[in-house]
Image (spheres, rainbow, N blue to C red):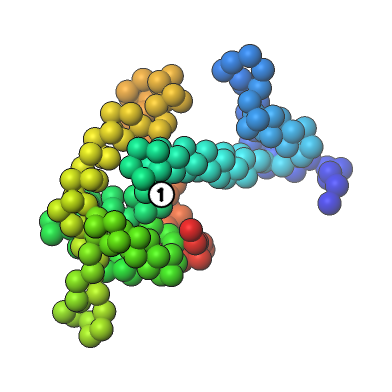
Amino acid sequence: MGKKEQTSPRAKSMPVPTAKSGGNGASLSELITLQWQAERSDLDLRDFLLAIYFMRLGTIVDRAYDRMCKTRYGVSGGDMRVLLALRRSGPPYVRRPTDLFRALLVTSGAITKKVDRLVEAGLAERLPDPSHSGGFLVHLTKRGLQFVEETVENLASEPILAPAMRQFSSAERDEINRYALRILSALEHSGGIDLDAADE
């Protein structure tokens, strides 16, 4: 569909801010912004562009996180997220598979594969689920707990986002976290997005 001949009232009253580069020349994401601003200046593109930013940010962070986990710890970023989910649940560090795939936004089949790898590595174990005949619980082993504790400390001291976040003050970082959490919470409670469709 081509450009509309008439500019919508919403677009007039809610213009998209022009992207500004922090370095020499525009980044790829800034170029995407400028291109869409030029092609569809008749639309209010802010939420549309924000979704693009989140998708690109997620991809960049996920790839960097996966590389870091494989290089330092010999496990994938996806498998590490299972360990982190078990750790943040608190003692005795046990979760049902359904809790894990809902929390991590992956399918039950993906969780099964991840648990298989973690069990083989001695980082997790399966325990019988007393509330579900034939079911099982995923438990963080002592070795797994030591393993994930080291990871959390490293991620806190050397976060993946550190190169980008250094430009913000502590108060600004707190504000960014609050806004990101508000957006995520709103999407999770909206009912309009299928959170069980993702795979990994």
Residue at the top extreme of this rendering? 24
Measured from the top left, where is residue 57 in percent x and y?
52, 39
Q: Residue at x 20, y 76 (%)?
A: 129
Q: Residue at x 66, y 22 (%)?
A: 26
Q: Amino acid at mark 1?
A: Ser
Nearest the camera: 123 or 98? Answer: 123
* Residue 56 picture location, percent across and down: 57, 40
In the image, residue 38 sits, relative to residue 127, either above or below, namely above
User: Image quarter for residue 18?
Assistant: top right
In the rendered view, tell whether residue 129 sits above or below residue 176.
Answer: below
Count of picture labels: 1
Would you name the residue on which mark 1 appears? 76
Look at 44% across and 46% down and name the residue there.
Answer: 183
Relative vertical location of residue 69 with respect to residue 127 in this rendering, above or below: above
Along the horizontal axis of the image, is 1 left or right of 44?
A: right
Residue 193: % across, % down: 51, 62
Q: Is residue 71 visible?
A: yes
**76 relative to 133 in the view: left or right:** right
Residue at x-position 33% and y-position 70%: 98
Q: Is residue 38 above or below residue 101?
A: above
| Any part of residue 185 in sight | no
Q: Where does the image place residue 157, in percent across and percent down from the top left?
A: 28, 28
Closer to the camera in the image, 81 or 53: 81
**Furthest residue to the bottom?**
133
Under tag 1, what secondary structure?
Answer: loop
Query: Dot 1, crowdedness within 10 Å: few (<14), some or many (≥20)?
Result: some
Between 97 and 117, the one lying in front of the other is: 117
